[in-house]
Structures are given as structure tokens and as C-alpha cells.
Amino acid sequence: MKKYVVVKLILLCLGFSSYVSVAEKSQLPMPKDGDTLLTTGSSYFPYVDKKAQDGGWSVSLVKAIFKRMNTPIYIDYLPWQRGYKWALEGKYQGTFPYVYTDERAKSFIYSKKINSIPVRIYTSKEMKVNTLADVTGARLCLPYGHSLSSEQSAFIKAYKLSVQRAADAGGCIVQVSKGWGEVGFTNGYLQGDYNSALFEVLDSVNIIDIPVATIPLYYIVSKELENAQAHIDKFNAALAFIEQSGERRQIDARFEAIANQK
């Protein structure tokens, strides 16, 4: 079953992902004097992925936005939790892409939307799902530390799901596959070529190709930075420009073609 993407596609926004090895880091170019430092994670197809064109969808958009701002940037690829922490502390001008949560909004200023996640659910092989109503009352597995978006919270409430936890996203897949849980969240862009590491474990569950929600992704800047609001205002203005000029549509079209390949 060439459908995969479960873990990294929702969790990117929460600060859980794979690491960049020392060897990989040593091969990256160093920032130049005057570069604005940004951080993101890794292995979050199609938004951030070194194997994808231009480093991924979100990366390509952010590069175009800062080019319009006439601001040279250096994007540092870090483990999500570390990059988030250092962006919060102001060591980086900004980080991306993240979903909106009320808790996070206490510490960060959000840009206008840069991308969206099409959310799907996965279930055990034994569970038969023809419509979303079939999951009413089911046990939903979430990793510890997973911050729910408002869209996910609304889905849980609408279908009266009970929440249980696992150590990480892979643990949720195991729980669901063994019948200890019944459903989990995943990303709708199921592109196996870029996520082969999780292919085998996803073979043990069914991914339901019914839209659950669409979650916006954002560029965020710590409120600890003195120029945070002014920076976001400039970012949003540049984003609006590339939308009006058609450049954003060109970038979106390239990555939609890649992401929708099955």
C-alpha cells in the first residue's frame, strides 16, 4: 500500500520530527553576514523536505516572500522542538510552518496563512468506515504533547471521540493496528516516495480518504523580539504581493502536482 505520511505531516506543527544528523549539518552552507536567521524542521513532506523541489512547499514560499522583502535569509534545519524553543527565545527571527493554537499564540505572532494541511484519519483494518459518522464514539489516539488545532478539536467534539495517548505518532499507529485504539489523524498528502521510512507500519492501518478538516499553516515570530509585529507586517505585505502577482499560484501549482501523486 503506497500510502504513507502519517506521522510527520500533522506533527510538524507541534515540534515532533526527525533530526538532522551531524553529517547532514556539516554539508549545509553557513549563514552569511547580514542573513536573517530562520528555522524549520525536516522530513515534513510536502511542506519541508530536502528531497523535494526547492526544499519543500513552505520553504519555497518563504524564500519567495523574503526575496520580495529584499531580505537575505539563512534557513537552519533543526529538530522541531529545538527550533521552536530557540525561535521562542529570539535566537531566530522566525520559524515555520506551524498550526494555530491558543496556547502558542500567547508567545508568538502569526503571519497570514502560508499553506494548509488536508487532514484525514486512519483506522484499524477491521473497522469499516463508509462515512465519518461511522467513527462516532471511537477511541482517538494522540501522541503525548500533541497540541490540537481548533479544527481537530471541533471534529473530536462533533463525533464524540474519546482521546487516549501514546508516546509518539508511531505508537498511535501501533495502538490502532492492534485494536487498542480505533482512529488517528494523518495528512491527506499521501506520497510514499518521500516517506518510505514509515511505509511498513502504515500497512497495518487503513487511511480513510474522506476530508476531515483543512488546517492552515503559518510563519510565526516570537513576541520576545522587539520588531516582531513590524516584521510580520512586512512578511504579510510581501505574501500579499506574490499572491497578486501570480508567483504564489505558480509555486502552489508545482507542489500540488507533486503532493497529489499517488
Image: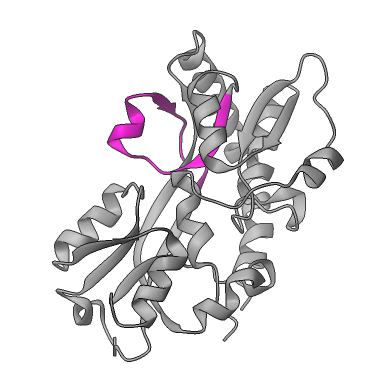
Q: 245 or 207: nearer the eye? A: 207
| Quadrant for the C terminus in the image | bottom right
**Can you say which quadrant of the picture contains the N terminus?**
bottom right
Of 261 and 68, which appears nearest the observer? Answer: 261
| Residue 28 as seen in the image, left or right of residue 16 | right
Q: Which residue is depicted at the point 32% across and 91% down?
A: 126
x, y percent for residue 68 = 69, 27
Q: In this view, does 149 lie to the left or right of 90?
A: left
Residue displayed at 83% across by 28% down: 30
Q: Please tell me which residue lies in front, 157 or 114.
A: 157
Q: Is residue 90 magenta?
A: no
Whether residue 100 is in magenta: the answer is: yes
Q: In this view, does 192 lie above or below 240?
A: below
Question: What x and y, as percent, mark residue 198?
Answer: 58, 71
Residue 245 at what x, y percent from top left? Answer: 65, 38
Residue sitting farthest toward the top: 226
Q: Please say whether residue 39 is visible from this viewpoint.
A: yes
* Picture quadrant of residue 179: bottom left
**Residue 240, placed above or below residue 197:** above
- Residue 145, given in percent of the width and then of the height, sits at 36, 47
Segment colored magenta: 94-115
